[in-house]
Structures are given as C-alpha cells and as structure tokens.
Image (cartoon, rainbow, N blue to C red):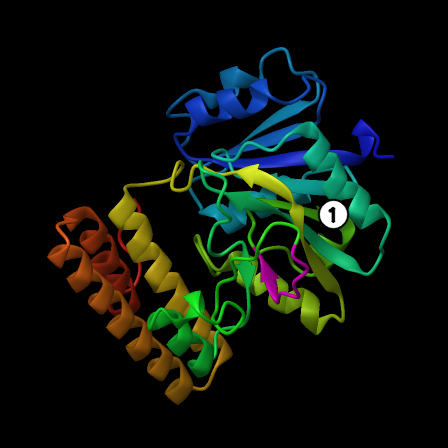
Amino acid sequence: MVELSEIEVVLVTYRSRALVETLLARLPRDLPLVVVDNSGGADAVADVLEGREHARYLDGGGVGFARAANLGAWSSERPYLVFVNPDTAPTPEQLFALVEELKGDPGLAAVSATTVTHDGRVELGVGGWEPTVGRVLVYATGLHSRFPTAGVFARPEPHQEIDLEWLTGACLAVPRETFVALGGFDEQHFIYNEDMAYGRRLREAGLRQKLRTDLLVPHAGAGSGGAKTTMLQMRGASMFDYVRRHNSAPAAHTMRLVLAAGSLGRAAVCRARGNPDAAAGFAAYNRGLWRGAPDMS
C-alpha cells in the first residue's frame, strides 16, 4: 500500500498552465507535487497550486527538461518520485500502481506507464532500445512496423510483456535515492534523449526497469513546449548528440546519415500526399541532425 507521504509528482512545465489545470483536476488535492516552471512565470502557473497544501513551485530558469526535472528531484524529501508530463492524464490509481511496483522490487530503478493516443493506440516510443546502426536502419526505413522489436522505438500491445533498454519519461516512477545516486537525467540533453540516457545509466549500474503495458495513460503529444518544428529540430539534434557521445565516430555518423535519409524520404512522401505540415516536421528533424539545436532563447 502506497502512502501519500511516500510519493511526489514532478511536473516540468513551459507555458502549460491550461494543461496543468486539467491534469491536477483529476488528482487528489492532498497529493504531494512540485511544479518546475521553465517559462519564468509567464503563464502564472503557480496560481494553479493555491489551496494545495503539499504542492511546491520552483522556477526552473528555462534550463530545459532534464535540469528542471532534476531540480524537482534533488529538492524533494519523498522516497518515490513520478515524473509526469503536463499533457498526460494518469489516474491516481495508475500513479500509485507505479510506485507500488517499485516498493515491491528493490532492483527496479524505473517503472513507466504506457502512453496512448486519443484513440487508445499505444504510442511509438513508450520506450525502446539503444540506437545501433542496424536498429536505426530498421527505424529509418519503416521496417519497425513489420519487425517491432528490431528498431529503436517500441510500440508494444497492451498487456504485452516486453524487455526494453529505456523508458519514456512521460509518466515515469523512480526511487528518489537511486535516481539521485545515478546522477538523475543527463543534463547535457536540453530536452529529448534524457530518458534514453537514464536507461543506459541504470543498466550500467546493474539495475532494471519495467514498462507497465497494463497501465494505459492518455497523452496529447507535443502539448507542452515550443513550436512543433522547433521541438522536432531539437529532437534531431538531441538524437545525434546521444549517438555521438555513446558510439564511435564512424558509427555515429553512419546513424546520422541513415536517420537523415529516412526523415527526408518521409518529408517527400508527405509533400506528395499534400501534407506540408508533416513534411516540415521531418525537414526540421533533419536540420537538427546536421545543424544542431535551434535557438531556444
């Protein structure tokens, strides 16, 4: 049984007040939580916490998701943390179930819920595997739809047991002491791939992680953050930064070429089908691979 005193929800926000209001309306008013605001109070999200005795507000300073999430974790006094994206909709029971899983297995360093789209379909990327040349090739060519465990990003079926090497941070529970000992999320990533890096850290420490495919949490997707193309450029930049730091130079540059070919191919298909917005997104991802992160100031 999970006690409220054992848990704290960590919400990293950026101009996300409306999403936070909707999310908190579903959660108990006495649930401990911390909002780390990366927008410098631009949307007065702190006002949403009025009347919540166990709620905290921190100015994230616009330092990106990883640093802001770590700030919430370092300042917490609760033994278990649940990182929740503002555009998700977990129930209290789902949050408690994640923590209950951690309490029952000291070898677990992370347990994640499975995020789903508005129509109930599991999202691609609820977790996945370390990028390798082979796995990136499967993903870039779209073969992951035929070979779902051969790519980088996983899309399991509900209730399917699956062994993953990293888990999405959209609704992720961790033991605070373990999380801090592992260094938390990798702050070299402004946003994206910090969850992949945490999976690497815990595996190197001989710890385990688990995706709960029975806990299906709605996720709006891209509901918090900057403009869509800006975020997709950041996603491309962060992916290349990750593979560059964890692979040899030839392997990293091969993966970048493969990902670039895949994104440009998808952009061409989208333009041919009359979907310029999607094409612009893939083109932005490609810019991130080659030009790096956009100006986030």
Against 262, residue 192 (above or below) is above
Please name the residue shown 44% across and 74% down the image: 243
User: Residue 24 vs residue 108: left or right?
Assistant: left
User: Residue 26 vs residue 161: left or right?
Assistant: left
Query: Residue 283: x percent and y percent?
Result: 21, 60
Which amino acid does the dot numbered 1 rest on? Arg
**What is the quadrant of the N terminus in the image?**
top right
Query: Residue 103: x percent and y percent?
Result: 84, 47
Circle 1 sits in a helix, a strand or a loop, which is it? helix
Q: Residue furthest top?
A: 51
Please name the residue shown 74% across and 64% down the image: 208
Q: Nearer the viewer, residue 188 or 9?
A: 9
Please name the residue shown 41% across and 85% down the image: 251
Mark 1 crowd level (few <14, some 14–19, many ≥20, 10 Å Cα):
many
User: Residue 154 vs residue 83: left or right?
Assistant: left
Q: Which residues are magenta?
A: 160-167
**What is the quadrant of the C terminus in the image?**
top left
Is residue 252 in the magenta section?
no
**Majority secondary structure of the magenta segment?**
loop
Against 247, residue 32 (above or below) is above
Q: Is residue 80 visible?
A: no
Is residue 161 in the magenta section?
yes
Q: Is residue 42 visible?
A: yes
Q: Nearer the viewer, residue 83 or 67?
A: 83
Residue position for label 1:
176
Against 230, residue 27 (above or below) is above
Query: Residue 176: x percent and y percent?
Result: 74, 47
